Image (cartoon, rainbow, N blue to C red):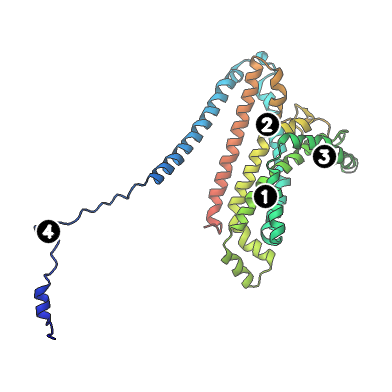
Amino acid sequence: MSKVTPAARAAADPAPKDPMEPGTVTPPTSSKPVSRLGDTVFSGLATWSGIIILVVLALVAAFLLWQGAPALIAPAEELPYGSFWPWVGPLVFGTVWAAFLALVMAVPVSIGIALFISHYAPRRLAAGLGYVIDLLAAVPSVVFGLWGISVLAPALQPAYSWLADNLGFIPLFAPPASGTGRTIFTAAVVLAVMILPIVTALSRELFLQTPRLHEEAALALGATRWEMIRTAVLPYARPGLVSAAMLGLGRALGETMAVAMVLSPALLISFALLQPTNPNTIAANIALSFPESYGLGVNQLIASGLVLFVITLAVNMIARWIVSRRKDFSGAN
């Protein structure tokens, strides 16, 4: 067998052509990615969904402004409910006050339930409890209103009387106590139960998304379970918890039927929680007054809806600012 020398091999195999040499044809290269139908359809749907949301929001704002403007510019003597701003002021106070009370009661309980489901409860119990909490979100507000007026208000009335008699020197518990239990505090408890599943579901998902390595590292360093939650889980979820609380607050601000059924309203500003006359909310006032309103009365109610729209928008903008301000200090990054 004859051996092939390197010189013979080089002579048999021609050297590769230089791509810059004249007469050399190089295949065209395209820097544009290949467009797929699925990507195009999904991108179009996502884009138009965002545009539609903005258009609907703008149309709602335009409708409220168009229909409420006559009440904002009309003389006070022509308005059936009196001058607009003195009339809507107590309603704004009642709306914010009831929602604030509900948020103070609901958020700690929601975070506790979410932590129990995500880090303490056995898996089977956690799955069942999570399903029950999610089911509460599907209960209609009318059912909560019936429960509040038929069960909760009579059950709380003796406690209201005791608080007014023994702690009446505190302005929040100033007498006289309501004889029916239909107070702003009862309405706030109903609102707290209504926003509980929303805040709990979001908080639970946030806690479950905490990186496992963060939790295991804290436990490996000798931390107890609570210390691990305090140093690893809660800092990671803090911005999301603010968003969950603000979402619950938005639901409480706009709730109508439950508050209208439970509350015994009046047009006043008062921090007392147990008295028979209580501040009303904008949404409940619209629901109660709209059927018998006409002319400028309808415009005045729609203008109060515009005020509620602005309040809700401002709350969400503040929440987004808080989240964007705190996210740099969170373990979420």
Q: Amino acid at mark 1?
A: Thr
CA gap, disc 1 and disc 3? 22 Å
The residue at 67%/61% (across/down) is: 119
- Mark 1 or mark 2, which has the lower sequence index? 2
Q: Which residue is mark 2?
A: 92
- Give the Cα separation between the discs numbered 4 and 2: 79 Å
For the residues marked 4 and 3, what is the alpha-carbon distance in whole angstroms?
Answer: 88 Å
- Of residues 167 and 312, the one nearer the viewer is 312
Percent across and percent down for residue 141 are 71, 36
x%, y% of residue 87?
69, 24
Q: Which residue is mark 3?
A: 152
Give coordinates of residue 12: x percent, y percent.
10, 74
Figure check: 43 above or below 262 = below
Q: In the rendered image, which residue does mark 4 sit on?
A: 24
Task: Answer whether residue 279 is visible to the viewer in this image.
Answer: no
Residue matched to label 1: 200
Mark 1: secondary structure: helix
Sequence order check, earlier mark of 4 and 2:
4
N-term-proximal mark, 1 vs 3: 3
Q: Secondary structure at mark 3?
A: helix
